[in-house]
């Protein structure tokens, strides 16, 4: 018997692409009576207005429509929704969800999520284990405990594998982890991979384990062919289907989301410009609100965060979303005066000003310039100020800034400093309050 296993990952709410994918997969069901379809998480991305307006429920409906057999979660499901919204995300799901390394603070799995799934189809028992990336401080701030995925997966497989014919891991953990897992656990037959947006044109075999991955944004559909003698898997192969080769469909997901976000925030006349290479009233307003919200001594952002400006007198949630589509949270970092001066000097180099930024939660195009609030300096004298008070090298200060700066690329120092993440608030939530208070 031959089984076709289709898989997707990291759709990130590219819903037009996913609409093509769902139609393609459903069309294949007539050709392949023995078929499975699985998704590897980060299907949800709140940069899309329909996902934002429904807090991911629209994504779950699309997965229902595609008749997905089982899914796992990505970090975009787990850390961009508040605790209750994540608990309710899959309440209408017509498919099982598996993640073995995420719990509430009482040690319980999130609602509607299982540590593993036994899927019996066509006389074959598939044991499916999902796991997600360890974004520990973010999950902790939301009331979740994310544990070491390697030990969690291996423990689950040791419980499961004697009761099933095939072991499949749904890994939202990245390609380097997947290779390590294959080496550590030969009981696994297949790893379907995600998170690092990689793809394997014909899969990758490590320690006898076939690893598949299908890139990002629905650019590809993964397809594996599994051949069985009885209930024994005797052959497995992988390929990718380029979705550019699929016929486009008529859909209005973006417009649907925009309409759901048309509620007005303000009817005051507003002028909120976007300027990439200088400070603006918009960056000033966001910086001031960020500093106030976190009770910081000063604040730092980059001008490219403002993706679109606004001028008019009917400012809606859709306008706010297009201005700040990022799933970026505020953070407050404790720095000594000496460290703060070092950060100021680094920011003044504007090393990333013309870069197109991908990842880190950023959903704009160019990075732009660093912009400060409540920081002053006399460059010729190397003197630095918080407000009117000169910065003391040995005193500690609180910097209000963005979680994307704490991942090590922009300011490596931040990885070691004491931090407080503010969740589930996004930057647009902070800006909403500021605009309402004008």
Image: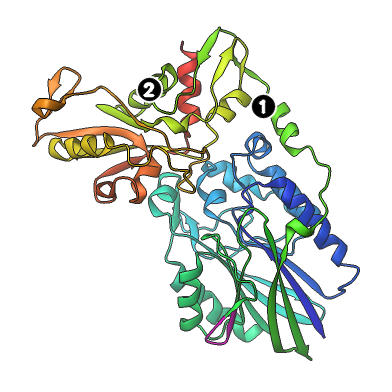
Tally the numbered discs. 2
Query: Which residue corresponds to the image point at 51% horizontal and 80% vertical from the top-left?
Result: 182
Query: Closer to the camera: disc 1 or disc 2?
Result: 2
- Give coordinates of residue 350: x percent, y percent: 32, 37
Boundaries of the magenta span: 205-210
Task: Tell whether 94 sits left or right of 407.
Answer: right
401 up-or-down from 273: above or below: below
Q: Secondary structure at mark 2?
A: loop
User: On the image, numbered disc 1 is attached to which residue?
Assistant: 261
Residue 51, disc: none
**Front residue of this view, candidates 79 and 287:** 287
Residue toward you, 8 or 231: 8
Report whether residue 92 is seen: no
Q: In the image, is 30 to the left or to the right of 106?
A: right
In the image, residue 227 sits, relative to residue 382, either above or below, namely: below
Kindly indicate the quadrant of the structure image that contains residue 310.
top right
Residue 215 lies in magenta, yes or no? no
Q: Quadrant of residue 81?
A: top right
Q: Can you give x and y, in whole percent of width and height, for residue 330 in the image?
A: 39, 35
323 with respect to 51 (left or right): left
Residue highlighted by disc 2: 279
């Amino acid at each position: 018997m031959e089984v076709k296993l289709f898989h997707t990952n990291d759709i990130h709410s590219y819903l037009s692409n996913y609409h093509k994918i769902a139609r393609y997969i459903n069309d294949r069901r007539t050709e392949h009576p023995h078929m499975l379809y699985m998704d590897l998480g980060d299907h949800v991305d709140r940069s899309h207005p329909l996902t934002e307006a429904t807090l991911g429920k629209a994504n779950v409906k699309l997965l229902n429509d595609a008749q997905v057999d089982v899914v796992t979660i990505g970090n975009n499901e787990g850390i961009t929704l508040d605790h209750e919204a994540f608990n309710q995300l899959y309440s209408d799901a017509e498919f099982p969800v598996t993640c073995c390394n995420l719990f509430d603070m009482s040690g319980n799995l999130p609602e509607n999520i299982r540590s593993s799934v036994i899927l019996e189809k066509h006389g074959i028992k598939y044991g499916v284990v999902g796991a997600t990336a360890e974004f520990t401080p973010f999950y902790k701030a939301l009331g979740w405990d994310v544990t070491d995925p390697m030990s969690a997966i291996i423990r689950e497989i040791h419980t499961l594998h004697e009761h099933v014919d095939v072991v499949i891991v749904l890994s939202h953990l990245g390609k380097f982890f997947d290779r390590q897992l294959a080496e550590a656990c030969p009981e696994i037959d297949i790893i379907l991979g995600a998170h690092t947006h990689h793809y394997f044109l014909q899969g990758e075999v490590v320690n006898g384990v076939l690893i598949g991955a299908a890139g990002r944004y629905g650019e590809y559909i993964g397809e594996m062919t599994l051949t069985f003698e009885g209930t024994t898997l005797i052959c497995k192969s992988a390929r990718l289907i380029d979705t550019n080769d699929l016929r486009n469909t008529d859909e209005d997901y973006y417009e649907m989301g925009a309409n759901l976000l048309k509620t007005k925030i303000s009817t005051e006349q507003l002028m909120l410009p976007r300027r990439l290479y200088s400070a603006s009233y918009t960056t000033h307003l966001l910086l001031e609100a960020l500093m106030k919200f976190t009770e910081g001594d000063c604040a730092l952002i980059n001008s490219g965060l403002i993706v679109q400006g606004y001028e008019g007198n009917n400012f809606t949630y859709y306008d706010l979303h297009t201005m700040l589509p990022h799933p970026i949270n505020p953070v407050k970092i404790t720095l000594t005066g000496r460290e703060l001066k070092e950060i100021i000097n680094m920011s003044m180099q504007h090393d990333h000003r013309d870069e197109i930024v991908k990842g880190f939660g950023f959903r704009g195009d160019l990075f732009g310039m660093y912009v400060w609030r409540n920081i002053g300096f006399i460059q010729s004298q190397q003197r630095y100020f918080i407000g009117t008070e000169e910065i003391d090298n040995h005193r500690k200060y609180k910097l209000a800034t963005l979680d994307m700066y704490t991942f090590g690329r922009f300011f490596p120092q931040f990885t070691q400093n004491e931090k407080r993440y503010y969740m589930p608030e996004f930057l647009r939530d902070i800006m909403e309050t500021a605009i309402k208070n004008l």
